[in-house]
Amino acid sequence: MGSFWYAFGKPSQDSYIWILPASKAYLKIIQCVIQEDVQIKAMERFNPQPKPVKEEKKKTYQLKRSPIKRKLKPKEKKAIDKESSQALVKKLDKYFSLFIRQKHSENGLVECYTCRKKMEINQIQCGHYHSRRFYSVRWEEMNCRPQCVSCNVFKHGNYPEFSKRLIEDHGRQYMDLLEVKKNRKVKLERTFLKVMIEHYKNLVK
């Protein structure tokens, strides 16, 4: 059987064009193969395979717990407050004031340094030539003298009479030295305050 050229298929993108020398039996095999291929493509087109679904990873969140602060009892709060610097300053003021009044007392009576009135220790105060806000001379014995409430509080220390009396008793150099001490910078450390408290606590009667 002589050979001939055979063409098959529609002129499109999916068409198959065969140009082969073939017999009748060979042509039937080609037709069967082409039909199967067309059927498979049609099935894939109308029955597409589902795409695999990606599993989403669940995000886990961990809650951070802040440490629970225990509420202090009233007694514990008082104990902490006693150890604070402010409480130590008040305690030192108490013992230092009593020491100054006892130092200048005679037979239980104390004379006001600025007005010369005499009164009992518990009725008089510890007066400061330079204000107590200057911590460098707040507990300086050179800067403190007994004063009555009238001079120390109502006359704001009776400063003119205070300075006049200090110059008469100790001289000008004494005042200059106080001025130098007043301008010093002091850090109120707890250890310093505790040592001073123990010192004046032992000196008072």
Image (tube, helix red, strand yellow):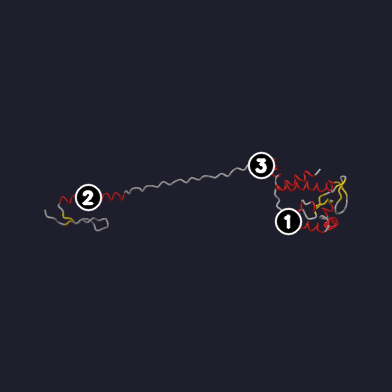
**Which label sits in the foreground, 2 or 3?**
3
- SS at badge 3: loop
Marks 3 and 1, the one that precedes in the sequence:
3
Residue in view at x 70 percent, y 49 percent: 189
The residue carrying mark 1 is 184
- SS at badge 1: loop
Give me the C-alpha separation between circle 2 and circle 3: 92 Å
Marks 2 and 1, the one that precedes in the sequence:
2
Where residue 49 sits: x, y (%)?
33, 48
Does residue 2 appear to the left or right of 202 in the view shown?
Answer: left
The residue carrying mark 3 is 72
The residue carrying mark 2 is 33
Residue type, label 3: Leu
* Position above or below: 47 against 11: above
Where residue 195 sits: x, y (%)?
73, 46
Where residue 171 sits: x, y (%)?
83, 58
Residue in view at x 81 percent, y 58 percent: 173
Q: Quadrant of the C terminus?
A: top right
- SS at badge 2: helix
Residue type, label 1: Arg
Residue type, label 2: Val
Does residue 202 appear to the left or right of 44 in the view shown?
Answer: right
Marks 2 and 3, the one that precedes in the sequence:
2
